Image: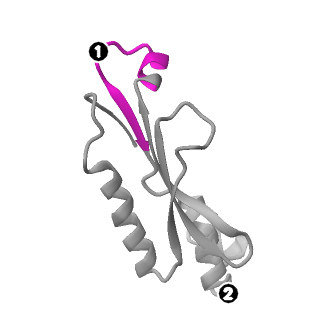
Amino acid sequence: MAKFHQREIPKGVLGHLSKVREFMRSLGYTVRRRDCTGDPGYHRAKTDLEVLTRTHGWLETHSCTYFGEEQVRRLGITGRLHSISCTGAASPRILVPWLEEQGLEGYLLSAGQATAGQ
């Protein structure tokens, strides 16, 4: 989801990640929040949520980025707006830790089973 806001960062934006973190913890995942503002890019602030997996270590599942005026200028939008981009639920990113925890047994269908109901 992307939003355009007046000059200041809305107070509830990073609260979105807190709700997601609690949801992921309720599913039994080990979750950490990382300040990635120092990463290369044209953002002014960036916060990621990562889930610990057995196979791949820490994987980013959600991200919230504040771009300030930079992205608005790149898009050619006039006015005094700032932009924010947050990952709502990136299903492939959440699927990897889920498959590691649940396993594949009982979840796989053969091609014949998948098309039988059509």
Three-letter amino acid code at disc 2? Glu
Q: Residue 28 versus residue 41: which sits nearer the camera?
A: 41
Q: CA distance from mark 2 to mark 1?
A: 54 Å
The disc label shown at residue 79, or none: 1
Residue in the picture at 46% in, 57% down: 89
Q: Quadrant of the C terminus?
A: bottom right
Q: Is residue 116 left or right of residue 82?
A: right
**First of labels 2, 1 by sequence position:** 1
Q: Please tell me which residue lies in front, 102 or 42.
A: 42
Residue 10: mark in rendering: none
- Whether residue 59 is visible here, answered yes or no, is yes
Q: Position of residue 30 (x, y in %)?
A: 53, 78
Left or right: 19, with 41 as reference point? left
Amino acid type of the residue tagged 1 in the rendering:
Gly
Bounds of the magenta segment: 71-85
Mark 2 highlights which residue? 105
Give the residue displayed 34% in from the left and 65% down from the top.
19
Q: Nearer the viewer, mark 2 or mark 1?
A: 1
Q: Is residue 101 above or below residue 21?
A: below
Q: Position of residue 107 (x, y in %)?
A: 62, 81
